[in-house]
Image (cartoon, rainbow, N blue to C red):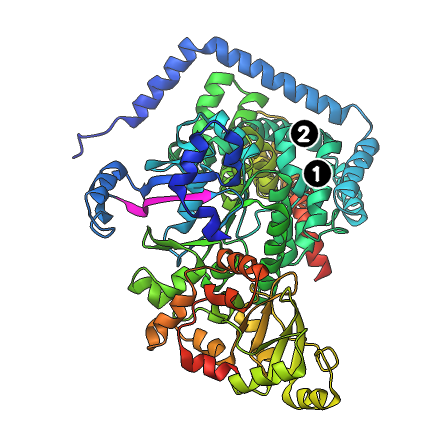
Amino acid sequence: MNDFRIPVGSWADSAVDWLTSNLSALFRLIADVLSWLFDLAELVFTTPPFWAVILVLAAVAFFAKSWKLALATVVGLGLIYGMNQWDNAMATIALVLVASAIATVVAIPLGIWAARSGVVSAVLRPVLDFMQTMPAFVYLLPAVILFRVGVVPGIVATIIFAMAPGVRFTELGIRQVDREVVEAGHAFGATPGRILRQVQLPLALPTIMAGINQLIMLSLSMVVIAGMVGAPGLGQPVVQALQSVNIGLGAEAGLAVVILAMYLDRVTAALGDRAPVSRALKVRAAED
Amino acid sequence: MPAGRCGDRERLRRTCAGANPSRCEVSVSALRAENVFKVFGRRSQEAVRRLRSGATRDEVKPLGTAAVIDASFEVQQGETFVVMGLSGSGKSTLIRMLNGLLTPTAGSVHIGDADITAVSPAELRRLRQERISMVFQHFALLPHRSVLDNVAYPQEIRGMAKAERVAKAEEAIALTGLAGWESSLPAQLSGGMRQRVGLARALAADTEILLMDEAFSALDPLIRREMQEQLVELQSKLGKTIVFITHDLNEAMYLGDRIAVMRDGRVVQIDTAEEILAHPADEYVAKFIADVDRSRVITAGAVMRRPISVVQLGGGPGVALRELQATQGTAAYVVDRRRVLHGTVYDTDLLAAQRRGDRTLEGVVRPDTSAVSPETPLSEMFAPATEAQLPLAVTDDDGRLVGVVPRVKLLEAMVPPEADASAPDLSAAQPSGTGNGVTGEHQAVGAGGNEAMASVPVTDEPTTEGEAR
C-alpha cells in the first residue's frame, strides 16, 4: 500500500508545464488584457480627488436605495480616507469590479446554458464545486507561474473563486420561472430567444441579481489572498500586518474591507430589488 | 345546436368535396386529433405498440407513463368542446398536444388542414400566432407588464406595430370587462380579474381556436360561475372554436356543446351533456354523473310536454269552459291564432264573463309572468313552478307557447336515469337535444294548430292527467 500512489500531483505538474510551454502566448495576452483593464479601473477611481469619488459613490447609493445609505457611505468612506487606506481601497474596488465584471459576463451565459440543458448542468455542477471549494492558494501557485506575481494572478484567482454563485443563481433563477408563463410564450408563438429575453431573464432577474451580489462579496473576500501574490489593494497592508504582527494596521485595513463589503452589498442588493419583477410584486405587498 | 353542428359528418365531407367550397363554412373541422398517443419515458414507441395491441396502461408502466392513449376527436368551427376528467386522466397532456407544446408519441393533430405534428418549428410558431391561442389555469401573465402590455403581448410577438396592437388589446380588454384596469399590474388584480386578462390576451391574439386549460379551476366558486357565464356570453358574440379542459362536470355540462370524458388516458365518451346524462357510456361515466347538478344541465326544452289546457283568445268563454271541463282543470293558458301566449284564464272569471255575455276572452286574461324559454335550466324553474297554478309555460323568442313543464316532470328530471323506472321516460324526451329539437318544434307550432305539438313525445298519460291541475 505504501508503494502504491496515484500520481495526481505529478499530473498537475506536467499539465501546468505543458500549459507554460505551449500556451504562453495566450497567457501573456490574457495577462496584458487583465492588467490593462485593472489599470483603467484604478485610474478612474484614483484620478479624481477623494471627496469627488465619495460623492459619486454616495450618489449611487442614494439612487439605488436611500439617503440613509448615502449618508452611511459618506461616513464609511470618510473613515477609510481618515485611516489613510484610501489608495489601497480604490485599488481593491478596481480589482473587485474588474474581476466580478468578467466573472458575471462568463457566469450568466453559462447559467442560461445550464438551465436549458440537463447535460450541461450535470457537467458544470462538479466543476463549480471544484472552483468554489478548492483552497485558493492551490490554484494561486499555477496562476503565479502562468501570469507571474502581481495583479493578474489576483484577478484570475478572484474570478475563478467568485464565479460559481453567478452560474448557480442564474440557472436556479431561470429554472424557477413559472412553467406556465414560459408555456404561454410558446403558446403564442414566441421564439426561444424572445422567451429568454422577455420572459425568463426578466422573471429570473431578482435571483440573478442575488447571485451577482454573492459573486461580488466573494471577490471581496479574495483581496487578502490576492495581496499575497502581489496584487495592490487592501490585501497588502493586511499581509504586511501579519508579517510584522502590526495589530493596528491589520485592524485599519480589515475595517476598510468591511466598509467596502457593506457598501457593495447594500448597493447591489438594492439594485436587485429594483428589478421590474420585484417592484411589480411589491405593489401588492404595499396594498395588502 | 350541438346535434346540428356535428351531426352527419359523412354528408359534410361530401359537401366539402364538391364544387362549392363556400358551403363548407357551415360546419368545418377546426381541430382534429387522430389516434393520438403520448407516453412519457425512454421506451415510449414500444409502449405505444403494446397499447395498440391491447395492453392496458398499467401493463406498459415499465416502458413509460401513458398519459394519453389513442385519442381521436374532431372539433367543429364555433363549437365549445370540453375535455373532462379527473387529475391524472391525461387531459392537460392532451390539450398541450393540440398546439404542439407537447409532441404526440404517435398519431397526428390537425389545425384546419395543417398537420402540426409534421411542420417545422418556425411553421409551428406561425400556426400558434395565427390560428390557436391558449388560456392557462394559473393565468401565466407576465408580472412585470401592465394589463395592457400583457394583453398586447401575442400581437407583439406577431410583430404588429405598437399603435395597432394597443388598439387590438383595448378591444379585448373592453370585451372582457377590464376597461379601466389597463395600467394595473397583474399583482394588483384579484384572481378573477387576472384570468380576465388571460382571456383578453387570448382574444387579442385573434385566433379562431382558443384552448382553455382548467381556466377557471383556480378561482373561487362564485367568481368561477361568473366567468363561466361571461364566457358563454362572449362565445355567443364571437363564435370561437373553444377546447375547454376541466375536472368539474358541472362546468363541463354548462359550457360544452359536446363533452369528451377522459379516464386513465383514454377518451371514454364524446357526446352532448344531455346525451351523457341519459346514456352514460360505461360504469365510470355513470358514477361520475351521479352527482352532477342535473338542474343546471337539463333545460326546459328537454322536459316540456304538450300543453293540455290551452284555449284560443278568439273563442268565447263558453268554449273555454268546455275545454276546462274536458281537462278537469281550473285554469288554462290563452293563445292567439299565431299561438302567442297571452296569459291565463281561471274558471271563476270565465263563468262571470259568460254571464256578462263577453264574446272573447280579452277581458278575463291575466298576464302570465312565469313563462320560461326552452334553454332555461331546471334550476331556474323551481321558484316559478312552486307559485304557478298551471304547469310552467315554455315560450320561444317570439312569445309562442311551445310546451309546458309540469311540476312532477321537474322533479322526475332530477333523478338519475338508472335510479328508477322512470328512466326510459326521461331519455325518451332527450334524443332531440335542446337546440335542434326545439327549433323543429317552433316551426311546427308556427305552422298551425294544437296538434303541432305532437313532435314532442307524449308517453305517459298519468302525468298529463296531473298537468291540468
Task: Mark 1 and mark 2 in contact? Answer it, CB < 8 Å.
Answer: yes
At label 1, the amino acid type is Lys
Majority secondary structure of magenta residues: strand
Residue A175 seen in this snapshot: yes
For disc 2, the neighbor class at 10 Å (few under 14, some 14 to 19, many from 20) is: some
Viewer-nearest residue: B324 or B37: B324
Q: Which residues are magenta?
A: B64-75
Residue at image mark 2:
B160
Asked which secondary structure carries label 2, the reply is loop
Residue at figure coordinates x 44%, y 36% from the top left:
B100
Q: Please give left or right for residue B425 compared with residue A49 in the image.
A: left
The disc numbered 1 marks a residue on which chain?
Answer: B
Q: Position of residue A144 (x, y in %)?
A: 49, 21
Residue beneath the point at 39% across and 44% down: B73
Query: Considering depth in this image, is A258 or B233 the residue closer to the camera?
Result: B233
Q: Residue at x 59, y 15 (%)?
A: A33
> Which image quarter: residue B45?
top left
CA–CA distance in space, label 1 to label 2: 10 Å
| Label 1: element kind | helix
Closer to the chain start, of discs 1 and 2, is 2
Q: Report the disc number at residue B168.
A: 1
